[in-house]
Image (tube, rainbow, N blue to C red):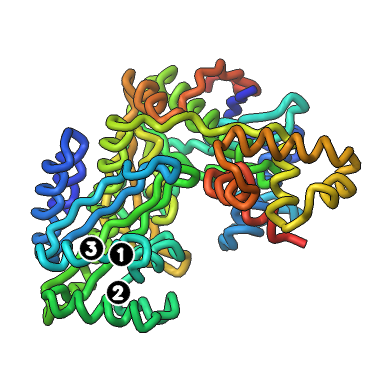
Amino acid sequence: MVIVEQGISDVRERSLLRSMFEARKHVFVDLLKWDVPVLDGRFEVDQFDDRDAYYIIVADEDDRHLGSARLLRTDRPHILGTLFPELCNGDAPGGPDILEITRFCLSRNQNAADRRRTRDRLVSALVRFALDRNIRTFTGVAEMNWLQQILAFGWDCRPLGPPRLLDCGMIGALAITIGPGTPALLAGNGIWEDEELTAIHWPEAA
Amino acid sequence: MFNRVEAFVRDVRELKTEEALAEALGDVSLDLGFRYFALTHHVDVRQDGASIRLHNYPTGWAEWFDDQKLGTADPVHRASHLTSVGFAWSRLEEMISLTPRDQHILALAKKEGIGDGFTIPAHVPGEAHGSCSFATVAGEKINEDQLPLAQLVGAFAFEAARRMGRLRDPCPPLPRLTDRQRECVIWAARGKSDWEISQILGVSHETVIQHLKQARERYGVGKRTLLAVHALFDGTIAFFDVLRR
């Protein structure tokens, strides 16, 4: 099942969100050694995990996290615009039809074949979400050692500026154009899995 | 100069032929201060010869290189398996131990007029691997400021080559193993015999023989060593599975 959540008030209130923040801690803190805050020694939660963040979560039948990504609005503070503006050749792209993909995360307790399938479902769900909500562009900050894989999904990517060598490695900013033709581009690379997205926990329209 | 790279990325999406890609890559290389480029792409290890190699090296060097069948013995190629971001050839010595033959190859390249180089490895797990290299004319130094841009150009050029390769030879679907077959392959990769695996998994000796036989058939290989190597390459099993204690 692919689940869409918007906003968090208390990460401990729902088991799926809990398992997602735990998986993020395992991946980004324990494995990749990112210097990001950890809550209660178990959950990786930062200042962008707020009521405006979207979470796309691939879950197993027991409602446990397999993979997830966080989407941030770019008309509000987000990672590229706030933390890494120097990665863009001009201003960081921002607007109501642009979302930033952050914290792309696959649970570590899957074998390689299952991880690949979770990855494909997650990438497909991101594109489905964008198409359903008229999002035309994803932006993102990526370590250069992921660049080749991101390009190999087959979708339409372009760099936003020259990569830079920082303490955390060489990182760069990308934009991905999403349109009606994107599913076919993913399908050409064996990535596309069309699944219905289940929205949970939508707040009252403000 | 970033605008130049943006234009390259835009143009390369529309290119249909390897010749057009080579021309575009040659042009952008010059703008980044490199006289030479070489892009190699091995589409699929299971298919002989289905690879793309584009370059504008001096004719003499390329012929000698091919005559010696240096493709995979090339020290730059070997080093490219050790990293996922670009490296300067001046760092080769720190990355791999250079044999006398490697030193000889590097000296010959220099004699043919090839100077400093920068190689961007390209790995798509389970599928394609290769690299994109840029080199100066012997005697000219690399412009360090351009290396991040060379990194981008290399990655996008490689993806364009990969797309062309797929159009020409669509990848056959990956063999899929059952969970039990996979477990047997992991133990086989760790050097266990069929009988030992049967004791570890608590199944009959004959069952393990059948699992591994079927796994070899799915990969079209006859030996358990090759089975393990193929399963590692396409990610059906991970190095971590095999090496952890």
Q: Residue furthest front?
A: B222
Callouts 3 and 1 in the same chain: yes
Tag 3: amino acid: Asp
Separation of residues labelled 1 and 2 (CA atoms):
17 Å
In the rendering, at what x and y percent does residue A136 appear?
33, 27
Which chain is mark 3 on?
B
Tag 2: amino acid: Trp
Q: Quadrant of the N terminus of chain A?
A: top right
Q: Give the label on residue B89, or none.
A: 2
Q: Answer whether residue B67 is visible to the viewer in this image.
A: yes
Tag 1: amino acid: Leu
Q: Residue at x 56, y 37 (%)?
A: B219
Q: Secondary structure at mark 1?
A: loop
Instruction: State the residue in front, A22 or B126.
Output: B126
Q: Identify residue for label 1.
A: B70
Q: Residue at x 17, y 76 (%)?
A: B115
Q: Secondary structure at mark 3?
A: helix
In the rendering, at what x and y percent does residue B57 appear?
14, 63
